Amino acid sequence: MGLSMYAAGLTHTGQVRSQNQDAIFVSADAVGPLPNLFIVADGMGGHKAGDVASNQAVERFHKYISEMPKPKEPADSYIQLLYSVAERINRELFELARAHPEEMHGMGTTFIACVIEGGRADFVHVGDSRVYAVTPEGIEQFSNDHTYAEEMFRAGEITAEEARMHPKRHHLTRVLGFDPYVELDGFSRNLEGISSVLLCTDGLSNMMDDGQLMKIVNREGYVEIRVQVLVDEANARGGSDNISAVLIDLREGTQQ
């Protein structure tokens, strides 16, 4: 059984940065073999290299998926497909940087791709951009942050509180394009009881706590307005980084 779905995305330079190195893609309609596709990427490295990394990752991912044949029936999981395309793009970005060392040395990008079908969401993820699942009563982070502090926390070397205050809490351990091989997280989640899925860059999640995000996401009304409120609130709190959000509303009867 399918889910009713309304989705919107927005990306903004923020109040401090001169350039937006985030990139997003939003389609509630089919893309190649996928019933829908949602992407968030946050680039890094060099003056323009971060912009190149995130935009190339999103554009190439969409292109390669679009060129694949449409399936005769829904897949049990799209994780392997998402994973294989992301691996291809990782190699291509690495080679692109190697071919242009002066302009693109050290470039990379966080990356989340999401597909929703039949009450299930499939993801491929790397970096510290985040996936949140929101219910009327709560919010849960589905993704793991690939940062030094979070890796130390998951290894039991520091506490959660120490991880939140650690000087390397924003230092990434994995991104697309920096190395010829990248370890990606691929995972599925059951969406029963979940009203919305939020994909965002750290320019949003660093500006608000989980409760504040949940409050805005759970508002009534058009999904486009709630995405705008998320970005506006992050800007009002300082907008210290580029801000991107993709909101997928799964509530029956929600207006687009």
Image: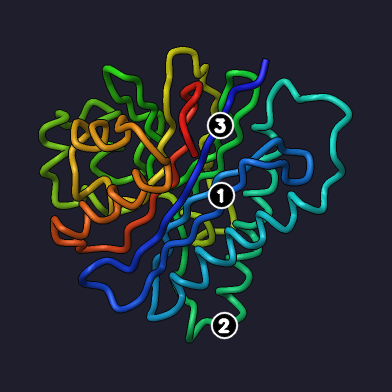
Residue highlighted by disc 3: 5
Callout in the foreground (2, 1) = 1
Local SS, label 3: loop
Q: Residue at x 56, y 38 (%)?
A: 114
| Residue in the picture at 35% in, 76% down | 19
Three-letter code, disc 2: His
Which mark is nearer the camera, 1 or 3? 3
Left or right position of 30 against 201: right
Q: Is residue 51 above or below residue 168?
A: below
Q: Looking at the rendering, in which quadrant would you find the N terminus?
A: top right
- Residue nearest the viewer, comparing 182 with 195: 195
Q: CA distance from mark 1 to mark 3?
A: 12 Å
Q: Which residue is mark 2?
A: 100
In the rendered image, the vertical position of residue 251 relative to residue 96, given as above or below: above
| Near-viewer residue (39 or 8) | 8
Residue 70 placement: quadrant:
top right
User: What distance separates the C-alpha of mark 3 from that of mark 2?
Assistant: 41 Å
Q: Which mark is residue 190?
A: none
Q: Mark 3 packing: few (<14 Cα in 10 Å), some, or many (20+)?
A: some
Residue 89 lies, in percent from the top left, at 64, 57
Which x, y percent locates residue 202? 30, 51
User: Where is mark 1, residue-wise?
Assistant: 26
- Expressed as whole percent of the image width and height from the top left, the position of residue 220 reads 33, 32
